[in-house]
Amino acid sequence: MNYLIVFLGAGIGGASRHGVNVLAARLVGTAFPAGTLVINVLGCLLMGLIAGFFAFRGHLPQEARLFLTTGILGGFTTFSAFSLDAALLWERGDMGLAVLYVLSSVIFSLIAVAAGLALSRIFLAGV
């Protein structure tokens, strides 16, 4: 049942992400990824609000947390989950691990995207 809850939430989040991207493209154009920036910042704000709510008034069932965070926000942006993980490491006093997590996530993710693009060019160049 939890997978269904996450699945439904992710659909809502993904559709919302698309809507924000389309709206941003209409309002400010596509020269700068404003939609993605708005999505990431808004998603992080919402993740903080939801995580804070569950931490201080966590009387809602686990299914609600899964639907809102893993589902909707996970479909909307995974940057919010990354940011929450980094913030929790920092708040626990694991500053070194938080910095390591942030730097390694950003660096390895950029390397992975570049590698994927390079591999695509290599394997699909003649197609």
Image (spheres, rainbow, N blue to C red):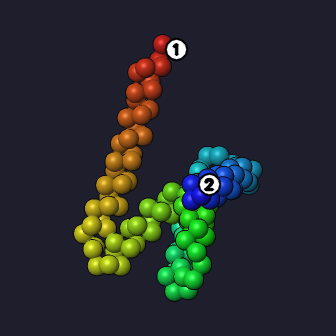
Q: Residue furthest bottom?
A: 56
Residue 4 marker:
2
Q: Residue pushed farthest top?
A: 126
For the point 40% across and 67% down, which residue is it?
Answer: 85
Q: In the displayed structure, would residue 123 be above or below residue 97?
A: above
Q: Quadrant of residue 76?
A: bottom right
Residue at figure coordinates x 57%, y 83% from the top left: 59
Q: Residue at x 49, y 82 (%)?
A: 55
Q: Earlier in the sequence, mark 2 or mark 1?
A: 2
Residue 13 location, x and y as percent? 64, 57
* Three-letter amino acid code at the position of disc 1: Val
Task: Name the spot of residue 62 as percent of width and height, x first.
Answer: 55, 71
Q: Residue at x 28, y 62 (%)?
A: 100
Q: How many marks?
A: 2
Which residue is tagged 1? Answer: 127
Classify 10 Å Cα crowding around label 2: few (below 14), some (14-19), many (20 and above): few
